[in-house]
Amino acid sequence: MIAPGQSLGLLGGGQLGRMFVMAAQSMGYRVTVLDPGADSPAGTVADSHLRGDYLDDARLRELADTCAGATTEFENVPADSLRFLARHCVVSPAAESVAVAQDRIAEKSFLRDNGFPVAPFRVVRSLADLDGPEGGALVPGILKVSRFGYDGKGQARVRSLDEARAAWTSLGGEPCVLERWLPLARELSVVVARGFDGEVRTFPVAENHHQHGILDVSIVPARVPDALAAQARANAVALAEKLDYRGVLCVEFFVLDDRRLLVNEIAPRPHNSGHYTIDACVTSQFEQQVRVLAGVPLGDTALHSPAVMVNILGEAWMHAGGEPDWSAVFAHPRAKLHLYGKREARAGRKMGHYTVLADTLDEALAQALQIRERLRPLAQPAQSIPPEALA
Ligand code: ATP
Ligand code: MG
C-alpha cells in the first residue's frame, strides 16, 4: 500500500490529470506531473511539475526516483514509458493494457477475438483493402485512423467505397478501420475500476449525447431498461477481467435500434462521461484511480442523486466575447461548476463542465439544458436530446 504523504506520478497534464491531482491531494498524497506543456491544467495544481517529453529518459528517471506509484491520464502515453516506470515503482494501468486501447486496430481485434460484440469493421492499411465484396458491406460507413484520434478527429463518414478511398488518402494514408455506420438508439458508457487484488466495481451507466463528434451531455442514470444497464456493467467487468486490467477504464457502448449492445471503444483512464461521479457519487472516478494505484480497497460507487453533466467548450467564450457569465450556473444551488484553468479558449476545446443534481432526472436535465442555453444559445437546440427513456 502507498500511504498518504507519499508521492504519486502522473503522465499527462490535461483536465483528467488535474482532477486526479485534486483527488489525490485531498487524500494527502503529493503528485508530480510529467508533461511537455508550460502551464497545463494538471501541471499548475500539482506539487511538482516535470516539464518534458513522455519519452525523456532523465525525466522518467526523476519520476521513478521520487514517486511510489505512477499512472496516466492520457492514452497516447508511450507504452515504453510505462514499462520503464514499472521497473522502478507501482504502475497502473499496465503498458500492455494501454497499448491495446491506444490502437484502434488492436482494440477492435481484441474485442472481436474475445467475443465482445463490435460494429462490423475491416482493417485498411492500403487501398487494396477496400476492394472486394466485403468492403461493400461496410458502407455507408465511417473511416477512423487507428492511432491518435479523439473527439471525432481523424474520422470521416463515407457513403461509398469511392468516398472511402478518397477519405483514406486525405486522412494521410495511415492504418485505419472502416466501420459500418449503424443506426444508434443510444450511446452509453461505463467506468469500471479493478484493483491489483482483482476487486472490481462499476459506476452507474451514463447516457451520452455528442455534438460534432464531441461529448456534449451525460445523463445518469442512463434512461434505458434496467436489464440493458446491467448488461453494460457486466460487459465492462468482463472486459476489465479479460484485459487483466489494473486501474480505471471506461467502456463506450452503442445501443442499436434492435437494442443490441455493442462495444464502441475503451479508454484506459477516467473519462469525460464519468465526470458526474465527482458530484453525484460516494467516490469519484478520480478517487478510484488513486485508490487502485495506492493499493487500497475501492470506494463505493453508489449515486447520491440523478445527475446531468454538460461540457463547456471554447464556444462559450466566443459567444460571451470573453469570460462567460457564470451566474447562469451559480444561480442553481445544485449545479456544480468545474473549470480546467486553460488560458486560451478555442472552438471545440474542452474548457470545463458543470453537473446539475436534482431529485428527479427530468428536473436535472431541464435545468442543465436551461443553463446550456444561456451559455451558448447558438448551439443546436436541446431537442437533439431525446426527451424520454428508451423502452
Ligand atoms: P472520443 O475519443 O471522443 O470518445 P473518438 O474520436 O475516439 O471519440 P468514436 O468514439 O469512435 O471516436 O466516435 C465518435 C462518435 O461518432 C461516437 O460517439 C458516435 O456518436 C459516432 N460514431 C462512431 N462510429 C459510429 C458508427 N459505426 N455508427 C454510428 N455512429 C458512430
Ligand atoms: Mg468515443
Image (tube, helix red, strand yellow):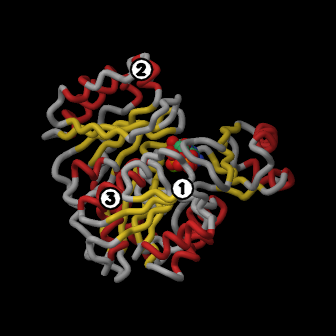
Q: Which residue is mark 1?
A: 51
The quarter of the displayed image where residue 111 is located: bottom right
Which element carries disc 3, helix, strand or loop? helix
Q: Amino acid at mark 2?
A: Gly
Label number found at residue 322: 2
Query: Could you tell whether 247 is left or right of 119 in the image?
Result: left
Measured in 3D between alpha carbons, the distance from the residue under mark 2 to the one under mark 3, in whole angstroms, is 31 Å
In which quadrant of the rendered image does the C terminus lie? top left
Q: Amino acid at mark 3?
A: Gln
Residue 373 spot, x, y in % from top left: 33, 21
Quick one: 221 or 343, which is closer to the camera? 343
Measured in 3D between alpha carbons, the distance from the residue under mark 1 to the one under mark 2, in whole angstroms, is 29 Å
Say few, some or many: other residues with alpha carbon within 10 Å of mark 1 (under 14 / 14 to 19 / 20 or more): some
Is the Cβ of the residue at disc 1 closer than 8 Å to that at disc 2? no
Residue at 23 percent of width and 48 percent of height: 279
Say few, some or many: other residues with alpha carbon within 10 Å of mark 2 (under 14 / 14 to 19 / 20 or more): few
Residue at 18 percent of width and 29 percent of height: 332
